Amino acid sequence: MLPLHAIGANSSADGNEAAFANGLSEDLTFRLAHVNGLRLISSASALRAQQDGFDAKQLAERLHVTHAIEGSLHEAGDQLRISLRLIETPSGQILWTQDYDRKFADVFALQQDIAQAVVSALALHIDMVQASEKTVDPQVFREYLELRHVFLTQNDSVAYAKAETALNALAARAPDFAPVHGLLAANLASGFEDIGRDNDALHEARHALDLDPDDIYAHAALGLVASHNHDWVTVKKEYDAALARSPNDQVMRSIIGMWLGRLGYGKQALSEFETNYSSDPLSYWGTYNLATELDTLGRHDEARHFLDLLPGLESEPEWLTVIARWRNAVWRHDYTAARHFVEQMSGPSSQEDEKTAHAYAAVAYAAVTEALLDPTRWPQAEAAIATLEAKTGGVSLLRLFAPPLNATPLLAEFEPGDQQPDGKILWTVDFTALHRDPAFPSFLQRMKFIDYWRSNGWPPQCKPEGDSARCE
């Protein structure tokens, strides 16, 4: 098993050159993922390792890497120079070096040559199909790589919005380049760009698949749109198709894990997240999904280990991290830690409305923490939750912790089609009162879970009962 470190731009590279180098690294990683006998560390974790200056020993210890590719990219006019070296870890021994001097227009052939050289150096075999993308304008390919890099790695909302605008413009300029339309389809279907863009997502996905039936993001987009309609059979079909075409794609592993968790298949979801984490151990989302699924399954001490890693993986303070750590502390009955996380909730935010909402949330979480310790304080906690809900306009999931349980409005929060990382919270073993509520069976029917379970197997916590199910 031979994980590879991504190629990166040199430290003197400007922003555009660095983005191009990172995008080229990701594309090379995708290509090498099809090589038998080669297991790859994701480009996201490799990039973080590069940014943190990992040496050969750290790569071996933190990423379980046996070999790493280090490199630099330089541009001068229409000329590219890529310098690579293959390093054995943890010894740091250099096994192979190579410089490539090519014209930018030859970038597709360059990728092919690099991939072949790498696997030859590792004594493996590669059988790569000559891609039709050679007919594509290399500048279009470059912009696509840079934009995909933003969508895969960027948490900054301003940068993300700019990338969305640029992606729409690029799709209009490149009607025959499938990857652009597949990426646009996935972004539209995800709901990140705008809610209610399913028809646009379907149009882009079908266009991408007409151009290239193997485009994984187009298949992912079709699955996401189907999930909005609770068409779980189509979701499975499209996700399976995407994963069959790229079994090492960490994005697809994460999407599939969230979907399985949402449908109550907790152990299967955990398996996907564990596979994802093994290839992407320095990724925020890979770690977050693994930790929160462990919490959902009631394995709170194990979850705590991974949750404690999250602050070191953030580019900026992450609201989801604090909430997840608070829940874990409450489930472990560590109220000292819960109070500590409440203190972090009113921290800095990039947007004024978020800052205000966080302040109201901090008051509500503090009140619930104290009420969990002293049940006579639930009236004050209820008032704080109601104030938070008036500010945000939605039902707070804090009500899952508060007596008496009113399941109907809470379950309505889990019905929308958008796939969210915390959709699996519905199945948390600590929320059995929700599962036993009379409103729960009809919720399962509305979500069309019952029909899917009957054909694809029941999750272990649920058993058929009449037209619905009984879940413990």
Image (tube, helix red, strand yellow):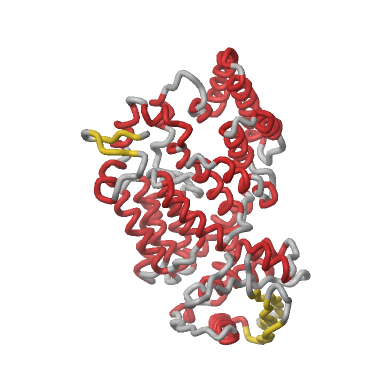
Residue 190 in sight in this render: yes
Q: Is residue 26 above or below residue 231?
A: below
Q: Is residue 1 above or below residue 113?
A: above
Say which quadrant the N terminus sits in.
Answer: bottom right
Residue 161 in sight in this render: no
In the visual, does 119 lie left or right of 416?
Answer: right
Say which quadrant the C terminus sits in.
Answer: top left
Q: Indicate the position of residue 260 as horizontal and vertical percent values.
A: 40, 49
> Residue drawn 70% across and 34% down?
344
In the visual, does 294 lie left or right of 80?
Answer: left
Splitting the image into 4 quarters, where does residue 60 fall? bottom right
Q: Indicate the position of residue 27 as horizontal and vertical percent values.
A: 55, 71
Q: Indicate the position of residue 471 as horizontal and vertical percent values.
A: 34, 35
> Residue drawn 44% across and 46% down?
419
| Viewer-closest of 429 and 26 | 429
Splitting the image into 4 quarters, where does residue 215 fall? bottom left
> Residue drawn 60% across and 30% down?
333
| Viewer-closest of 298 and 174 | 298
In the visual, does 293 lie left or right of 244?
Answer: right
Q: Indicate the position of residue 366 as horizontal and vertical percent values.
A: 64, 25
> How many labels, in total?
0
Q: Is residue 43 above or below residue 67?
A: above
